[in-house]
Image (cartoon, helix red, strand yellow):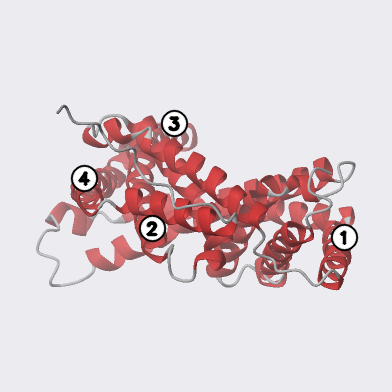
């Protein structure tokens, strides 16, 4: 273990890991009951945060156990992700159907008012899918409990916590600031590498990849935020906004792709059941409305994102973040403040 003599580094890593492990396990009962969709959302986020922290501090964990722990966390994240995405889709359809029933909804075409069954049929299929996914969720939870990750990882972390505290060291050691500087800088550059695609709405995959990079940066900032008082508050708020808006855009892209597929599948199902597709026509108006609404929403959110991204550039949010990281690192290792090189002028 490279940092086994750096008790301060181990203390910081252990506290961060233990906090995220506890956040994950405390949602398990609620996820099993599947009565509140926010439980699965919180546990999914907690699993991602735990995965991120394990990646950051894997050298502080036993090598023999690490692969199995990572495998179980990945399995939980995947199972929760599919279920959560379906919950979000069902929730959107509930909102759309409520909107269609509002007398004040002037933007709703009369054909759509007469034919909401298309959206209701889609919601039914999604609910059926969600019930099946709950089996996968329960299976992942059962596998997690059978693997005893909570007990093994928790015991390892508590033992390290005791040993580190007995050393009477501060968690904010120079090594922690070095790790914060290096990893956060890397995650920032990974996100900024997609800067050019911001101005190309058709680059769906790139915008989605940018969202993933923003998510990784966010989780890294959250881990190291306690080191900087409120110094990371602004970049954290900004990257959270980037992730949220790009996530909304991605959800719209998924809808635009999924809806034509659903209509074809439902048409084939109707033909197989009735021997003809005449009854399928009553489903199309609502589904076409939903597709157009998602396309419009995507365009609006994309424009918001471009404007927001330009504002972050004007405010130099990322330059300020780099400076904060450099300054604290310099203070931690007792070095002079890092200054930009002075250009020589001709006499």
Q: Which residue appears at 42% of the width and 56% of the height?
A: 324
- Which residue position is annotated with label 3? 268
**Numbered circle sitting on residue 235:** 2
Cα separation, mark 3 vs mark 1, equals: 54 Å
**In the shown orientation, is residue 3 left or right of residue 303?**
right
Q: Position of residue 8 (x, y in %)?
A: 74, 62
- Local crowd size for mark 4, using a 10 Å CA cut-off: few (<14), some (14–19), many (≥20): some
Marks 3, 1: nearer the viewer: 1
Quadrant (top left/top right/bottom left/bottom right) for the C terminus: top left
Cα separation, mark 2 vs mark 4, equals: 17 Å
Whether residue 193 is situated above or below residue 73 in the rendered picture: above
Quadrant (top left/top right/bottom left/bottom right) for the N terminus: top right
Upstream in the sequence, badge 2 or badge 3?
2
Marks 2, 3: nearer the viewer: 2
Upstream in the sequence, badge 2 or badge 4?
2
Upstream in the sequence, badge 3 or badge 1?
1
Cα separation, mark 4 vs mark 3, equals: 40 Å
Numbered label tally: 4
- Local crowd size for mark 2, using a 10 Å CA cut-off: few (<14), some (14–19), many (≥20): some
Q: Position of residue 17 (x, y in %)?
A: 71, 60
Q: Which residue appears at 49% of the width and 37% of the height?
A: 273
- Which residue position is annotated with label 1? 156
Upstream in the sequence, badge 1 or badge 2?
1
- The answer to which quarter of the image holds residue 10 is bottom right
| Residue 263 makes an appearance in the image | no
Cα separation, mark 4 vs mark 1, equals: 45 Å
- Which residue position is annotated with label 4? 306
Please, what secondary structure does the residue beneath circle 4 have? Answer: helix
Please, what secondary structure does the residue beneath circle 1 have? Answer: helix
Whether residue 21 is situated above or below residue 309 in the rendered picture: below
Whether residue 278 is situated above or below residue 107 in the rendered picture: above
């Amino acid at each position: 273990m490279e940092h086994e003599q750096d008790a301060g580094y181990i203390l910081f890593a252990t506290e961060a890991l233990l906090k995220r492990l506890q956040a994950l396990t405390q949602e398990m009962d609620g996820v099993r009951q599947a009565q509140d969709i926010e439980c699965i959302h919180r546990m999914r986020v907690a699993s991602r945060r735990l995965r991120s922290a394990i990646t950051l501090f894997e050298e502080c964990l036993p090598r023999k156990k690490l692969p199995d722990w990572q495998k179980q966390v990945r399995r939980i994240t995947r199972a929760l992700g599919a279920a959560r995405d379906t919950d979000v889709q069902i929730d959107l359809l509930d909102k759309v159907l409520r909107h269609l029933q509002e007398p004040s909804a002037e933007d709703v075409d009369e054909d759509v008012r007469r034919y909401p069954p298309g959206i209701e049929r889609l919601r039914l299929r999604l609910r059926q899918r969600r019930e099946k996914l709950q089996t996968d969720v329960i299976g992942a939870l059962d596998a997690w409990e059978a693997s005893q990750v909570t007990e093994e990882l928790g015991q390892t972390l508590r033992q390290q916590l005791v040993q580190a505290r007995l050393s009477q060291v501060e968690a904010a050691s120079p090594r922690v600031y070095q790790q914060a500087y290096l990893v956060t800088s890397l995650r920032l550059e990974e996100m900024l590498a997609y800067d050019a695609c911001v101005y190309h709405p058709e680059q769906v995959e790139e915008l989605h990849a940018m969202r993933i990079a923003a998510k990784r940066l966010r989780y890294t900032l959250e881990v190291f935020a306690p080191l900087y008082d409120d110094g990371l508050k602004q970049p954290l708020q900004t990257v959270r906004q980037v992730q949220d808006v790009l996530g909304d855009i991605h959800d719209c892209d998924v809808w635009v792709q999924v809806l034509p597929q659903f209509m074809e599948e439902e048409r084939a199902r109707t033909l197989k059941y009735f021997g003809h597709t005449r009854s399928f026509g009553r489903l199309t108006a609502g589904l076409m409305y939903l597709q157009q609404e998602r396309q419009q929403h995507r365009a609006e959110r994309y424009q918001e994102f471009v404007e927001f991204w330009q504002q972050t550039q004007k405010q130099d949010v990322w330059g300020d973040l780099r400076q904060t990281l450099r300054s604290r690192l310099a203070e931690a290792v007792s070095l002079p403040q890092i200054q930009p090189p002075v250009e020589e002028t001709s006499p």
